[in-house]
Image (cartoon, helix red, strand yellow):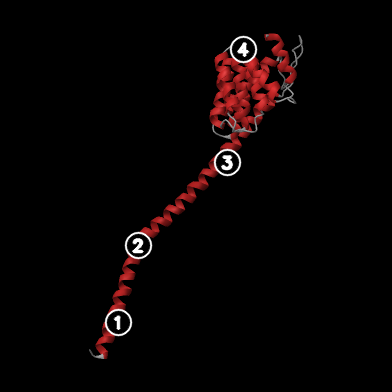
Amino acid sequence: MKGSERHRLKENEISQALGGSIERLQENRSALSLAGGVALLVLLLAGGYWAWTTRSENRAQMLLGDAIVVVQSPVQEAKPGAKPTPGSYPTIQARAEAGLAKFTEAFTAYPSTQAGIAARYYAAGALAMLGRHGEAATRYQEVVDRAGANSFYGRVAQLGVVDSNTQAKQYDRAITAAQALVNNTADEAMPRDAVLMELGRVQAAAGKKAEAKQTLDKVIADFPDSPYIAEAKKILAEIT
C-alpha cells in the first residue's frame, strides 16, 4: 500500500472518530441539559422550601409570642364602677381561656413548626388548668406524636399525658404512659428515678397497692440519693 493511501486512510479514521465523538456529544447534549435542569430545579425547590419553612416558623413564633403575652397578663378582679386595667383579666380562668384560644390559633395554623408544637404543649397546660384533663391528655399526646418521644417537648408532654390521665381518673391510660417512660431506657435525659416515681404515684392513685409498693421500693433501693425518697416512703406508709 502506498504511503499516500495509508495517509488518506488515517485521515478517514481520525475524521470518523471525531465525527462519532461529535455525534455522541450532540446526542448527549439534551440529556446533559436535562440533568442540569433537574439539578437547578432541585436547588430552586430547596431554596423555596427553606424560605417557606422559615416564613412559616417566623409567623408561628409571632402567634406563639402573642399567646404568651396573654398568659402573662395580670389578673385583676373587676371592682364595681371601676374600669378594668387594659390587658388584664378578671380571673385566672378567664386568662387561661384567652391563652388557650391564642395557642390553638398558632398550632392550628402552623402544626408542624417548632413554635406550633410548643403552642400545642402550652394549650394542653391551659386545658389542664381549666380542669379539662381529658382534652389536655389528647393535646399532650399529639405533642409526643409530632415532636418525638425523645425530644424536649416530647419528654415533658409524656409526663403531661400521665398527669392529665391521672387527674381524669383514666388510670389504665396513665399507667400505660408511665410504664412506657420506664421502658424507654434509651433516653438518658429522663432520670430513671423520676419516671419510676411517676409510675408509683399513678399505681397508688389507681389503688394498685402491690404494684405501687414494688415500684416505690425500687426507687428507694436503687436510688438511695434520689430527691424522691421522702415522697416514696410517704406513699408507701399510706398504702401499707
Numbered tag placed on residue 11 in the rendering: 1
Location of mark 2 (residue): 28
Residue type indicated by callout 2:
Asn
Examine the rendering and report whether any part of residue 44 can be seen: yes
SS at mark 3?
Answer: helix
- Residue 81 lies left or right of residue 118; in this view the side is right
Q: Give the residue displayed 62% in from the left and 22% down from the top.
A: 160
**Local crowd size for mark 4, using a 10 Å CA cut-off: few (<14), some (14–19), many (≥20):** few
State the CA–CA distance, disc 2 to disc 3: 39 Å
Residue 114: x and y, percent?
59, 34
Pointer 3: what residue?
54
Nearer the N terminus, badge 1 or badge 2?
1
Q: Residues within 10 Å of mark 3 (few under 14, many from 20)?
A: few
Judged from this view, the residue extending furthest toward the left is 1
Task: Name the residue: 58% across, 23% down.
Answer: 140
Q: Nearer the viewer, residue 136 or 92?
A: 136
Label 4 to label 3: alpha-carbon separation:
52 Å
Nearest to N terminus: mark 2 or mark 3: 2
- Residue marked by disc 4: 210
Residue at the front extreme?
A: 221
Q: What's the CA distance linking mark 1 and mark 2?
A: 25 Å
